[in-house]
């Protein structure tokens, strides 16, 4: 279409969106820039180009494009969300939360509550994060991932009954989602309160998470190892923990350091407690 009509702005836009899925963000930027050249008041062109600049960490350029998208469409909540995310990357916390607040005001279903909640959690502001996730759940009670996010914070606060309740809700909503199953397995395997541990159930859930992810998620494999240790099968625990560590990308990071410590525990026939 572009070859036949080099001024077909819609074709540039659609091809740009396709490049974001590849992803090839630099080519996407070229197409969105052409779209903007042909349609200088196109909100989508500025928004998506800003999204691409954010993706390649050109934060100042992203902010400039989000500014223009918001100038053209002052009620575009998602532009506020992504501009806020960019401000966070630039360590501009006050500006980031101002944008998140505005996005929540404009459209609570824009994802702003979830993003703001995650941002609070990253800053160890657990109560604020829980409040955001709770409000997001009130608005969209069928989103399993929101329950998982809140459960993670309950666990951080050692409120394990609440964490398990939220994870049960997530699993009821989507029992084929490994991201719902694995966190439950981890709590059941590692909880410092023995009243909440259940090694057999942890193994069942962790194995299903591994199967659903085609055994490609080394963190889930590590959780399976930890579950076997809680169940008293230390040979299986050592086997699967070593299997996780065979993944170089997993073994080379902080998670790998922790996994090696757990492996040593399992070799000593000791379970892991979080």
Image (tube, grey):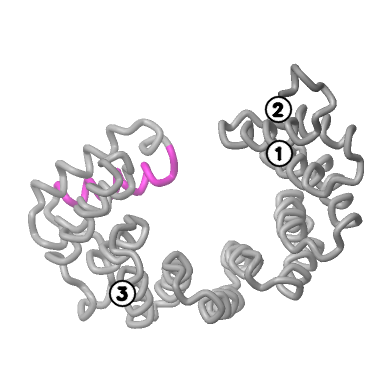
Mark 3 lies on residue = 168
Name the residue that disc number 1 marks: 52
The chief SS type of the magenta part is helix
Does any portion of residue 67 appear in the rendered image?
Answer: yes
Q: Which residues are magenta?
A: 253-267
Local secondary structure at mark 2: helix
Image quadrant assignment for residue 176: bottom left
Reading the chain from its start, which is encountered first: label 3 or label 2?
Answer: 2
Q: Secondary structure at mark 3?
A: helix
What distance separates the C-alpha of mark 2 from that of mark 1? 8 Å
Task: For label 2, count other residues whose C-alpha is less than 10 Å away and answer few (under 14), some (14-19) or many (20+).
Answer: some
Residue 33 left/right relative to 191: right
Q: Is residue 82 above or below residue 12?
A: below
Residue 100: percent from the left, percent from the top? Answer: 73, 66
Q: Earlier in the sequence, mark 1 or mark 3?
A: 1
Taking the spot 45% from the left edge, 77% from the top edge, the residue there is: 157
Helix, strand or loop status at disc 1: helix
Residue 137 locus on image (x, y percent):
51, 77
- Image mark for residue 26: 2
Left or right of residue 251, residue 62 in this image:
right
Is 264 one of the magenta-colored residues?
Answer: yes
| Of the pair 9 and 148, the residue shown nearer to us | 9
- Residue nearest the observer in this picture, 257 or 62: 62
Query: Which sits in the foreground, 96 or 189?
Result: 96
Where residue 103 is drawn, which disc sits there? none
Q: Residues within 10 Å of mark 3 (few under 14, many from 20)?
A: many
């Amino acid at each position: 279409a572009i070859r036949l009509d080099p001024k077909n702005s819609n074709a540039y836009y659609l091809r740009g969106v396709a490049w974001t899925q590849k992803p090839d963000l630099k080519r996407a930027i070229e197409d969105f820039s052409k779209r903007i050249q042909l349609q200088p008041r196109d909100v989508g062109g500025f928004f998506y180009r800003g999204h691409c600049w954010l993706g390649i960490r050109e934060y100042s350029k992203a902010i400039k494009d989000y500014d223009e998208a918001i100038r053209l469409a002052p009620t575009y909540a998602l532009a506020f969300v992504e501009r806020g995310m960019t401000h966070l990357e630039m360590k501009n916390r006050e500006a980031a939360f101002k944008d998140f607040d505005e996005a929540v005001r404009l459209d609570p279903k824009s994802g702003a509550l979830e993003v703001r909640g995650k941002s609070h959690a990253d800053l160890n502001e657990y109560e604020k994060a829980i409040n955001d996730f709770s409000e997001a759940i009130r608005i969209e009670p069928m989103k399993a991932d929101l329950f998982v996010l809140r459960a993670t914070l309950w666990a951080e606060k050692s409120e394990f009954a609440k964490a398990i309740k939220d994870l049960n809700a997530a699993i009821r909503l989507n029992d084929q989602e490994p991201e719902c199953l694995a966190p439950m397995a981890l709590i059941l395997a590692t909880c410092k309160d023995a009243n909440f541990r259940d090694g057999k159930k942890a193994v069942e859930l962790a194995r299903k998470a591994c199967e659903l992810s085609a055994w490609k998620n080394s963190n889930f494999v590590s959780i399976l190892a930890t579950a076997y240790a809680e169940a008293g099968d230390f040979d299986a625990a050592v086997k699967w923990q070593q299997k996780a560590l065979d993944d170089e990308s997993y073994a080379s990071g902080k998670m790998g350091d922790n996994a090696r410590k757990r492996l040593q525990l399992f070799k000593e026939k000791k379970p892991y407690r979080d």
